[in-house]
Image (tube, rainbow, N blue to C red):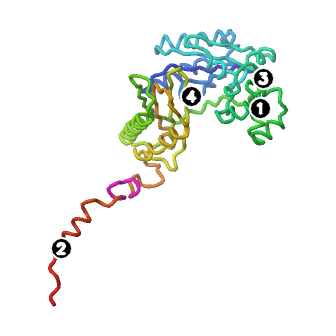
Amino acid sequence: MMSGRSILRLSLDLPPDTSAELLERLRRLLEDFTPRVQMLEDGAVLDLTGAIRWWQRDARGITELVQLRTLAHFGVRSSAGVAGTPMLAAMACALTPLGRRTVIDDSPEAIAAFLRPRPVRELPGVGGKTAALLGEYGLRTVGDVADVPQHTLQRLLGARAGRALYEHAQGHDTTVVDPTPAPATLSTEHRFPRDELDPAAHRRILLALADDLGARLRATDQIATGVTCTIRYADLSATRRSRTLPEATQHTVLLARAAYAVYDSLGLQRARVRSIALRADALRPAARATRQLTLDSADDPSRSKPSPIAPASATAARCSTPPPSP
């Protein structure tokens, strides 16, 4: 179960309108500690394995220094998780408040002590439906799942999903830190003045956010290949769901349709929503679009629906035409 690695998952408290320049400056600061830095939408993952000897500090000491410098240089607070794998580091980070850090020793005993009591839904790839299905069989914690044979999980979830869940429950994760720059994104957010329960109000805000993103994409001559919607609730929990667009676009109508589809897939019922954020993912220049970016008849209401004036005008025209001579 020991990996021999030291992985730092850093969650940065960034505002929704964070500039690309600030993200790049943060990346350069983190690369002062290790060249293996993978930037994420809300933070970064750092492989500290080779940096420990260079800095002559343990993983906790380097993490403290990273958090101190991001706060001192950019005023950005952070929470951090350190473990032998990206999965464990991310889980530890998610449980850590801002300004603090959680370190899981890379030993079987420490990993089991942290992992086994955790709810199974905290494992990557386990959504609400999967957690509910496992709960029907009494598998509510990671420890419950870890004690079940792999072939049993595969019968419940399918070959690939069952195998992945079994490996994660054992603490195994072969994911590597990929320093390849992440694709550019663009995001916008609305915070309700009070917790909002009305789905119609949620959809109005989604449309406004899609309109804002579309205008900004057109202004910068970019297209998006996907959208991500993040819903934050009154209890400070959040749900994030993404969708790939049928084709890259900068049109408000298509962005709004995708945002509605993501929202509907959440199946929210009387949820007390505190804020909604919408992000355009994997941006690229509009010149690389697969077809000309013009609204076709399906997207233009004035073309897709006959004008209510047209029939009356046609009738008036017919009435004003004199009958043919006998």
Residue 80 x/y as whole percent = 61, 16
Dot 2 alpha-carbon crowd within 10 angstroms: few under 14, some 14 to 19, many 20 or more? few
Q: Earlier in the sequence, mark 3 or mark 2?
A: 3
Q: Which residue is mark 2?
A: 319
Can you tell which of label 3 and label 1 is closer to the viewer? 1
Q: Residue furthest bottom?
A: 326
Q: Which residue shows up at 52% across the image and 40% down it? A: 264
Residue 182 x/y as whole percent = 55, 33
Can you tell which of label 1 and label 4 is closer to the viewer? 1
Q: Nearer the viewer, residue 217 or 93?
A: 93
Q: Amino acid at mark 3?
A: Gly
Can you tell which of label 3 and label 4 is closer to the viewer? 3
State the CA–CA distance, disc 3 to disc 4: 29 Å
Residue 35: say if magenta: no
Q: For the residues labelled 2 and 1, say whether their Cβ atoms are less than 8 Å apart.
A: no
Q: From which residue to which does the magenta span run? A: 297-304
Q: Amino acid at mark 2?
A: Cys
Specify the label residue 137 is tagged with.
Answer: 1
